[in-house]
Image (cartoon, rainbow, N blue to C red):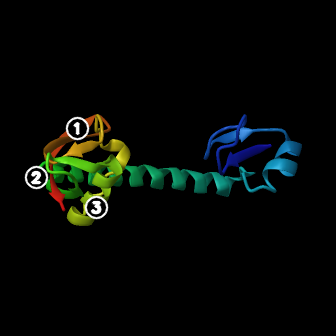
């Protein structure tokens, strides 16, 4: 039976692949669980439309990401943290904190996995933070100040 995978299925295939599998396995195990559907002409046409929409969506996301990276060059992010008089912070600033602050203050959405900190920021002052996405890198500045 020819089927379309609706989800990744171990030892069968990945989502949106068209596979040929035994009828019994498809009818008794995979179709009742909603993991696959039969590959009819209309289902295959719908699959092609879905794949095209996914490609278009990825292109739009890439364009928005490139715009966000261009905007980041101009950004200086101000962050605060509790610390001592020598400039050491009590709690480190991690990539997740930077991502949330960028979204909240500058409306730039960057996934924390793209923020490439060598180690969490533990001191006050200016820090250069690299962001690397799909082979494109940009540096932006974070100014960390101490609150009492």
Kind of element beneath mark 2? loop
- The residue to which callout 2 is attached is 74
Is 73 above or below relative to 134? below
User: Which quarter of the rendered picture does the C terminus lie within?
Assistant: bottom left
What percent of the width, then of the height, locates residue 57? 40, 55
- The residue to which callout 3 is attached is 103
Residues marked 3 and 1 touching at CB (< 8 Å): no
Kind of element beneath mark 3? helix
State the residue at coordinates (65%, 44%). 8
- The residue to which callout 1 is attached is 137
User: Which quarter of the rendered picture does the N terminus lie within?
Assistant: top right
Q: Earlier in the sequence, mark 3 or mark 1?
A: 3
Q: Nearer the viewer, residue 54 or 67?
A: 67
Q: Residues within 10 Å of mark 1 (few under 14, many from 20)?
A: few
55 relative position to 144: left or right:
right
Q: Residues within 10 Å of mark 2 (few under 14, many from 20)?
A: few
State the residue at coordinates (30%, 37%). 119
Q: CA distance from mark 2 to mark 3?
A: 15 Å
Q: Residues within 10 Å of mark 3 (few under 14, many from 20)?
A: few
Kind of element beneath mark 1? strand
């Amino acid at each position: 039976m020819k089927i379309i995978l609706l989800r990744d299925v171990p030892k069968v295939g990945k989502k949106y692949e068209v596979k040929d599998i035994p009828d019994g396995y498809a009818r008794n195990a995979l179709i009742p669980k909603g993991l696959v559907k039969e590959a009819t002409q209309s289902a295959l046409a719908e699959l092609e439309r879905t794949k095209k929409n996914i490609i278009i969506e990825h292109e739009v996301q890439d364009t928005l990401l490139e715009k966000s990276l261009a905007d980041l060059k101009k950004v200086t992010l101000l962050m605060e943290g509790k610390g001592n008089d020598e400039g050491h912070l009590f709690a480190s600033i991690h990539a997740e904190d930077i991502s949330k602050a960028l979204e909240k203050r500058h409306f730039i959405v960057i996934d924390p996995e793209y923020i490439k900190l060598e180690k969490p920021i533990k001191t006050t002052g200016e820090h250069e933070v690299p962001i690397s996405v799909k082979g494109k890198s940009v540096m932006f500045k974070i100014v960390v100040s101490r609150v009492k």
